[in-house]
Amino acid sequence: MNVRMHVPNLLARAGTVSVLALVTISGTTVVPGTAPDAGAASVSARALRIAASKKGSPYQYGAQGPHRFDCSGLTLYSFKHAGRMLPRSAAAQYHRTRRVRASARRSGDLVFFHSRRGVYHVGIYAGSGRIWHAPKTGAVVRLERIWSHAVSYGRVR
């Protein structure tokens, strides 16, 4: 049955909760304002999986993959292959994303590390206070706990 053709009849006979359940089951988004967030979440989830798939890749300053990365190179590569373009540097990525409070952060958001001189590092939030990132020379892409309180979160649009 094509749910879209029957939605007006269903709306007339069903309550809001029932209609939202039907819309959710059908996979059709009718609720205004939810489609962009759902799309962004899907891109962020893909980017997170891509970053995780690079586990063990060596750090190299200025590298953007596919086998070596620096911090912003990993985020750029991950989001590019998930369907979103980001600028090259961590600071430029910071300015391109929408700020999110720590309490509203979700997996796939970018985590920016700050010093007095500005943004110096970026990773992809993996949940439970951890990020995927390319940390420094001599290290590899890895999952690690966020070690600083001087961070902010950004959502890729």
Image (cartoon, rainbow, N blue to C red):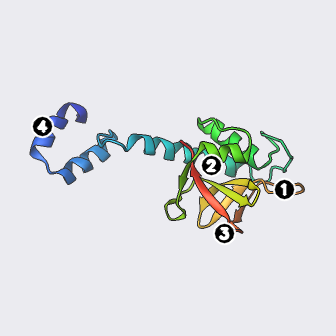
19 on left or right of 35: left
Callouts 1 and 2 close, C-beta under 8 Å: no
Q: Which mark is residue 49?
A: 2
**Disc with the residue nearer the chain's start (2 vs 4):** 4
Closer mark to the observer between disc 3 and disc 1: 3
**Disc with the residue nearer the chain's start (3 vs 2):** 2
Residue 5 in percent (x, y) is at 20, 30
Q: Nearer the viewer, residue 43 or 56?
A: 43
Query: Which residue has dot 1 on it?
Result: 136
The residue type indicated by label 2 comes to Arg
Q: CA distance from mark 3 to mark 1?
A: 19 Å
Q: Which mark is residue 17?
A: none
Quarter residue 117 falls in = bottom right
Q: Residues within 10 Å of mark 3 (few under 14, many from 20)?
A: few
Residue 139 in percent (x, y) is at 85, 57
Image point (70%, 68%), residue name:
148
Above or below for 6 versus 52 = above
Query: Which residue has dot 4 on it?
Result: 9
**Disc with the residue nearer the chain's start (4 vs 3):** 4
**Disc with the residue nearer the chain's start (3 vs 1):** 1
Q: CA distance from mark 3 to mark 2?
A: 25 Å
The residue type indicated by label 1 comes to Lys
Q: Residues within 10 Å of mark 4 (few under 14, many from 20)?
A: few
Image point (81%, 49%), residue name:
57
**Disc with the residue nearer the chain's start (1 vs 4):** 4
Q: Residues within 10 Å of mark 1 (few under 14, many from 20)?
A: some
Secondary structure state at the residue bearing disc 2: helix
Secondary structure state at the residue bearing disc 3: loop
Residue 12 in percent (x, y) is at 10, 42
Query: Which residue has dot 3 on it?
Result: 149
Q: Farthest residue in the left direction?
A: 13
Number of marks in the rendered image: 4
